[in-house]
């Protein structure tokens, strides 16, 4: 060690600097003798057993465990395992869970039920592990933050050639015969700044130290990762404690402010009361405006295999007013923390629009009209035709009333209400021409529910659509928090692993320049930078070219 550094360290250990008297009033050399003598006497008088470390209290032991890195890693592994169990074993809030549960063996039902695997994200031990891991991250951050902060705030601005040459990353000293110290300092400063280092120059009597640094913020990257993890855990906790999911059947013309949530009772799994429906109130009302099905083949049925997309147009009402929304198959709609997306559709066939050929019974040219669901059309003489309902497979029941034979489009028919200009109302049914030929002589064609309206109606075409769409409504206040946490985590991990904190001491003494430093990661890249700085100091023009 250099003589100046030795004198500074001696002064710190024994008293005031520069040979002044220390706190006990002795000159520095005498103080050293007194301290050494006192230490010897103390070691001679005290037995070996008296020097044993004091026992830690229970609170210190618990805090030490909670803040330890191995404990945190263990909790993280256990949480990952629990999440994998939740993905592999179906959770009981899903609609398909009753069928899944029925296929399990009795042993699986017993073990999974007792371990809460069917509802693991709401299990007490899952939330406890989240709490303990969050506490571990906070305590570990508190323990290690002062050391990391010292790298940012407390910087060693002076160094000796020996200090620089004993660093982990160093190069051979650069020697320039006949060069002045000011010139070497200027070259070193320019070379370090050219490689994106921040430089601080400290002048001393016999030497000049240039402290070059870049990426000091990287020392705090781990704490940014900790904040990201805590954000994710907070979102997960909000999801586990406050989220709920239900469903609502949407039929054009109907409105509701309630959704149904399926509840599966594990304790009554063998009874008919295992599955029940629970009504959940919504802070707004949903009215169905229109439903539409885009089919691959319009001649086939409206099953999922023949569907490109289904669309649900709704109107939302609350205390703030009304707004219309469109929910696609792969485009949900978000409102007030609720997410609405397509879940399924009712297999009963219906028609979004119907095309009719209307011919007056007294003679005259037929008229072609198109009527939307729950709407009406007007004829030339002012008669209004109201589209009441659609029957995909028409038949007459035992009570001589219309009935639906099946949900498929075998014998489609449209129920109409006829309103004449005088206000007189009557009912009618429109059938397809092939079906009319089959039933033209049937007795029900002259029955009371087919009262004569003065017109003949033929169903020429219709747009296939289900009777209703099922919207799945999910309230998850933690989802956006989780998304934010994962975004922060990705950015922080990139910052932590793709960058590093690099510190370089350049000591100019006489005609030599000593370079040495360290980096918390990626030392090969740091070594390459030091070599480039040394080359620029040796020959600025050659290194720059």
Image: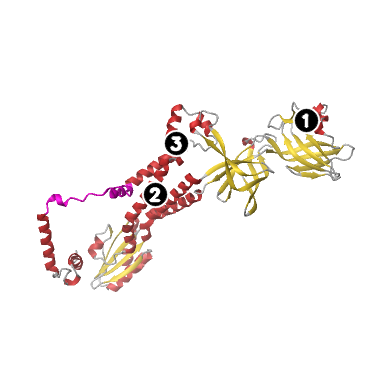
Residue at image position (48%, 52%) is 484
Q: Earlier in the sequence, mark 3 or mark 1?
A: 3
Q: Is label 2 in a helix, a strand or a loop?
A: helix
Badges 3 and 1: C-beta atoms under 8 Å apart?
no
Q: Is residue 105 magenta?
A: no
Front position among marks 3 and 1 = 3
Where residue 477 sits: x, y (%)? Answer: 51, 49
Q: Residues within 10 Å of mark 2 (few under 14, many from 20)?
A: many
Q: Earlier in the sequence, mark 1 or mark 2?
A: 2
- In which quadrant will I find the N terminus? bottom left
For this rendering, which residue is in front, 16 or 264?
A: 264
Answer yes or no: is residue 523 visible. Answer: no
Q: Can you tell which mark lies on residue 435? A: 1
Badges 2 and 3: C-beta atoms under 8 Å apart?
no
Answer yes or no: is residue 306 visible. Answer: yes
Where residue 452 sits: x, y (%)? Answer: 85, 35
Q: Is residue 58 magenta?
A: yes
| Marks 3 and 1, how far apart at CA | 55 Å
For this rendering, which residue is in front, 48 or 347?
A: 48
Q: Residues within 10 Å of mark 3 (few under 14, many from 20)?
A: many
| Marks 1 and 2, how far apart at CA | 70 Å
- In which quadrant will I find the C terminus? bottom left
Q: Is residue 297 left or right of residue 428?
A: left
Span of residues in magenta: 46-69
Q: Residues within 10 Å of mark 1 (few under 14, many from 20)?
A: some
Q: Quickly name the residue at label 2.
A: 134
Q: Is label 1 in a helix, a strand or a loop?
A: helix
Q: Quickly name the residue at label 3.
A: 117
């Amino acid at each position: 060690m250099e003589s100046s550094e030795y004198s500074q360290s001696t002064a710190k250990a024994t008293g005031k600097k520069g040979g002044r008297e220390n706190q006990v009033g002795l000159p520095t050399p005498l103080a050293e003798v007194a301290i050494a003598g006192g230490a010897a006497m103390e070691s001679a008088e005290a037995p070996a057993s008296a020097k044993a470390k004091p026992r830690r209290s229970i609170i210190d032991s618990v805090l030490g465990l909670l803040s330890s890195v191995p404990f945190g890693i263990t909790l993280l592994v256990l949480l990952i395992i629990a999440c994998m169990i939740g993905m592999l074993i179906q959770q009981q809030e899903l609609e398909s869970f009753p069928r899944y549960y029925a296929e399990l063996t009795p042993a699986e039902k017993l073990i999974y039920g007792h371990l809460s695997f069917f509802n693991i994200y709401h299990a007490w031990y899952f939330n406890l592990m989240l709490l303990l891991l969050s506490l571990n991250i906070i305590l570990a951050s508190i323990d290690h933050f002062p050391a990391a902060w010292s790298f940012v705030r407390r910087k060693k601005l002076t160094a000796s050639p020996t200090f620089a040459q004993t660093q982990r990353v160093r190069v051979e000293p650069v020697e320039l015969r006949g060069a002045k110290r000011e010139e070497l300092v200027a070259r070193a400063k320019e070379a370090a700044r050219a490689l994106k280092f921040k430089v601080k120059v400290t002048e001393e009597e016999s030497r000049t130290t240039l402290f070059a640094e870049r990426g000091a913020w990287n020392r705090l990257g781990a704490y940014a990762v900790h904040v990201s993890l805590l954000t994710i855990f907070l979102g997960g906790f909000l999801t586990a404690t406050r989220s709920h999911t239900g469903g609502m059947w949407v039929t054009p013309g109907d409105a509701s402010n309630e959704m149904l949530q399926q509840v599966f009772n594990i304790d009554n799994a063998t009874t008919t009361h295992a599955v029940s429906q629970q009504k959940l109130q919504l802070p707004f009302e949903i009215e169905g405006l229109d439903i539409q099905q885009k089919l691959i083949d319009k001649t086939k049925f409206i099953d999922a295999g023949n569907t490109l997309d289904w669309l649900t147009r709704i109107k939302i009402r609350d205390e703030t007013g009304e707004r219309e929304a469109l929910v696609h198959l792969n485009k949900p709609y978000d409102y007030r923390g609720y997410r609405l997306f397509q879940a399924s559709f009712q297999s009963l066939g219906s028609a979004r629009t119907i095309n009719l050929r209307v011919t007056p019974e007294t003679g005259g040219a037929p008229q072609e009209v198109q009527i939307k669901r729950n709407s009406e059309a007007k004829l030339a003489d002012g008669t209004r035709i109201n589209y009441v309902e659609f029957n995909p497979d028409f038949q007459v029941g035992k009570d001589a009333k219309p009935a639906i034979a099946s949900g498929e489009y075998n014998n489609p028919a449209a129920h109409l209400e006829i309103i004449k200009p005088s206000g007189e109302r009557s009912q009618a049914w429109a059938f397809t021409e092939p079906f009319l030929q089959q039933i033209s002589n049937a007795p029900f064609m002259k029955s009371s529910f087919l009262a004569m309206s003065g017109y003949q109606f033929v169903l020429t075409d219709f747009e296939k659509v289900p009777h209703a769409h099922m919207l799945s409504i999910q309230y998850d206040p933690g989802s956006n928090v989780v998304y934010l946490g994962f975004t922060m985590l990705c950015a922080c991990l990139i910052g932590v692993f793709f960058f590093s904190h690099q510190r370089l001491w350049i000591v100019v003494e006489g005609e030599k320049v000593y370079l040495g430093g360290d980096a918390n990661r990626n030392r090969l890249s740091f070594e390459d930078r030091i070599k480039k700085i040394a080359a620029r100091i040796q020959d600025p023009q050659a290194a720059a070219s």
